Amino acid sequence: EAQVTQNPRYLITVTGKKLTVTCSQNMNHEYMSWYRQDPGLGLRQIYYSMNVEVTDKGDVPEGYKVSRKEKRNFPLILESPSPNQTSLYFCASSLTGDWSPLHFGNGTRLTVT
Amino acid sequence: GDSVTQMEGPVTLSEEAFLTINCTYTATGYPSLFWYVQYPGEGLQLLLKATKADDKGSNKGFEATYRKETTSFHLEKGSVQVSDSAVYFCALTTGGGNKLTFGTGTQLKVEL
C-alpha cells in the first residue's frame, strides 16, 4: 500500500531534550516536506526537500533540522525542543516538486513541557 | 505573499443539506487551487483541484470552480452525509518547490 509513515504518533517530552520524528514513504517520491498544524493558523511549511541531499527552508524553520540521505526518508530533528514547538506535525511527499498532489502521513502530536 | 482565507467554522448541517464552504485567495502569478480533507486522527487527503481559471474540480460529490475574477474557490456539495464530517482546507500553490499555502481550515459536522 502506498503510504507516508510517521513515527511516533504521540510524543511527550521536556524542554531541551533532543528528539527525532521519522518519516518514510514507499512511493519513490522525489519531493518531501514537513508541516506543522496549529489551531487558527492552518498548516505551515517547516522544511522541504526536492531530492536526496537537497533541502530548503519553508516558512517556519527556526528550531528544526532535517536531512535527506535517502530518497524514502526525511526525518525532522528538534535539537532543543521548546514549549512553542508543541504542535501537530505532518510529513508529506509528492512525485515531483511542482504541482503534483501531496500525500500526507497521519501526523505526530508533540507536547513539550 | 500568498494567502488563503476560509470561512470560519464549525459548520453544522443536517444530513442531506447543501454545503458551501467559502475560500478566497491572494497570490502572485497563476496559482493552482486545492481542497484537502482531514478526517479525525488522520492526515490530509486531496479532495479536488483546479489548475486554471474556470476549471471545475470534482470528487465524491464535491465541486469547486476556479474563479479568477473573484479570486475564489468555494467548495460545494448538494447533499452532505454524516461521513463527510471532517476539517476542510483550501490551499494554493504557485509552483516552485510545491509549497502549499493553506487556509486555517473549516470544521464540518453533519448530524442525522
Image (spheres, coloured by chain):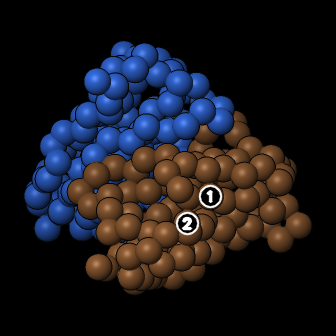
Residue at (28% x, 46% y) in the render: A106
**Type of amino acid under label 2:** Lys
Q: Is residue B66 left or right of residue B69?
A: left
- Give me the chain letter of mark 1: B
- Give me the chain letter of mark 2: B
Q: Is residue B111 left or right of residue A7?
A: right
Q: Where is residue B81 in the image (x, y as percent from the top left)?
A: 38, 67
Looking at the rendering, which quadrant does residue A86 occupy?
Answer: bottom left
Residue at (73% x, 59% y) in the render: B65
Marker disc for residue A54: none
Using the image, determine if residue B77 lies above or below residue A25.
Answer: below
Q: Where is residue A25 in the image (x, y as percent from the top left)?
A: 34, 26
* Secondary element at image label 1: strand
Residue at (81% x, 62% y) in the render: B67
Residue at (17% x, 48% y) in the render: A9
Q: Earlier in the sequence, mark 2 or mark 1?
A: 1
Q: Which of A4 and A84 is in front in this view?
A: A4
**Type of amino acid under label 1:** Glu
In the figure, the shade used to draw chain B is brown
In the figure, the shade used to draw chain A is blue
Q: Which of A93 and A34 is in front in this view?
A: A93
Using the image, determine if residue A61 lies above or below residue A102.
Answer: below
Say which residue label 2 marks.
B77
**Count of numbered circles on the image:** 2
Mark 1 nearby-residue class (10 Å; few <14, some 14–19, many ≥20): many
Q: In which quarter of the image is the C terminus of chain A?
A: bottom left
Contact, mark 2 vs mark 1 (Cβ under 8 Å): yes
Say which residue label 1 marks.
B63
Q: Which of A5 and B76 is in front in this view?
A: B76
